[in-house]
Amino acid sequence: MTDTPETNVETFMSHLIELRDRLLRSIIAVVVLTLLLVPWAKEIYAVLAKPLLAALPQGATMIATDVTGTFLVPLKVTLMAAFLVALPYVLYQAWAFVAPGLYQHEKRLALPVIVSSFVFFLVGMAFAYFLVFPVAFGFFASYAPAGVQMMTDIDKYLSFVLAMFIAFGATFETPVVVVVLVRLGVVSLEKLRSARSYVIVGAFVLAAIFTPPDVVSQLLLAIPLCLLYEVGLLLARFVTPRGREAEQTTG
C-alpha cells in the first residue's frame, strides 16, 4: 500500500494532536503540583535561601527591591520545585511520544539515557546546593569590607541560584554524553582518552565563566567535570559502538 498525500497529512495531523495532548498533560501536571505547593511557597524559598542566610552575619537578612518580589520570587521557586517533581512524568510523556518511531536498539539506548540524565542532573544540583553554595557564600561574606553589610536581593539571588543549578546540572551530564558519543560511533574511546588535556583546559575555562570569581568555586566545578569525564571513559569501556555492533550481528 502506497502512501498518498491525504494519508501523509492525516498521519502528520495525528502526530500533532498526540504531541499537543502530551504537552497539555505535562503542563497540567506542573500546574497542579504548583497549586498544591503554593501554601508552602515561603517555606520552599526558605530552603533555597538557607545556604546564603547561613553565611551572612547574625541578624543580616535578604531584601526585596521590587514591590512584587516578595510574592513572585517564592512563586517562581515553587514553580521550579513543582517542575522538578513532575519531571519524571514529563519525561515519560516525551518518551511515550517518540518511542513508537524508534527501532528496538534505539529504544534500548534512549530509555537509559533519559533516566540517567535526570538522575545526574539532580545530583549536580544537590552538589551545588550542599557543597558549592556554602563555600561560595562564605567566601563572599568574609570579604565584605568594614562597614558594609551584605544584603542580597531575593530576585537576583534566584537568578544566581538557577544559573548555578543549570551549570552544575549540565556538568554532571558529562558521563552520559561520553557514553552516548561512543555508543553512536560519533567518536572513538581512544580519541576521547587522547583529548584529556583539552578537556582539563576546557573545564577550567567553563568554571571561570559560569562560577563566581573565586578560586574555590571554580575548582568545585572544574575538578568534578574532569572526574566525571573519567567516569564517562570508564563506563564507555563497556559500551559497543553501533558500527561495531552491526558488524558483529552480520558476522
Image: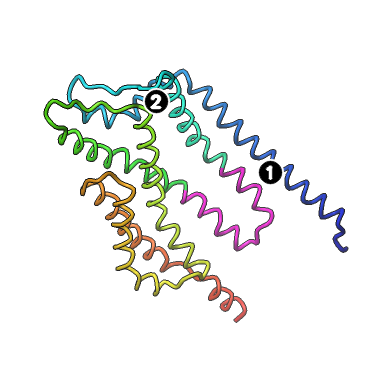
Which quadrant does the C terminus fall into?
bottom right
Residue tagged 2: 44
Q: Give coordinates of residue 246: x percent, y percent.
A: 59, 75
Residue drawn where x is 60% and y is 63% of the image: 105
Q: Nearer the viewer, residue 88 or 219?
A: 219
With 89 as the anchor, is 12 left or right in this view? Answer: right
Residue 74 magenta-highlighted: no
Which quadrant does the N terminus fall into?
bottom right
In the orientation shown, which residue stands out farthest toward the bottom?
251
Residue 107 magenta-highlighted: yes
Q: Secondary structure at mark 2?
A: helix
Residue 1 versus residue 206 in the image, above or below: below
Residue drawn where x is 24% and y is 40% of the image: 136
Instruction: Report how far apart the C-alphas of labels 2 and 1 lie in the structure.
Output: 32 Å
Q: Nearer the viewer, residue 194 or 105?
A: 194
Q: Which circle marks residue 19 in the picture? A: 1
Q: Give coordinates of residue 56: x percent, y percent.
A: 21, 28
Residue drawn where x is 74% and y is 42% of the image: 17
Q: Give coordinates of residue 109: x percent, y percent.
A: 55, 59
Q: Nearer the viewer, residue 191 or 209?
A: 209
Determine which quarter of the picture holds residue 199: bottom left
Q: Amino acid at mark 1?
A: Leu
Q: Which residues are magenta?
A: 91-117
Residue drawn where x is 55% and y is 53% of the image: 111
Q: Give coordinates of residue 113: x percent, y percent.
A: 50, 54
Secondary structure mostly seen in magenta is helix
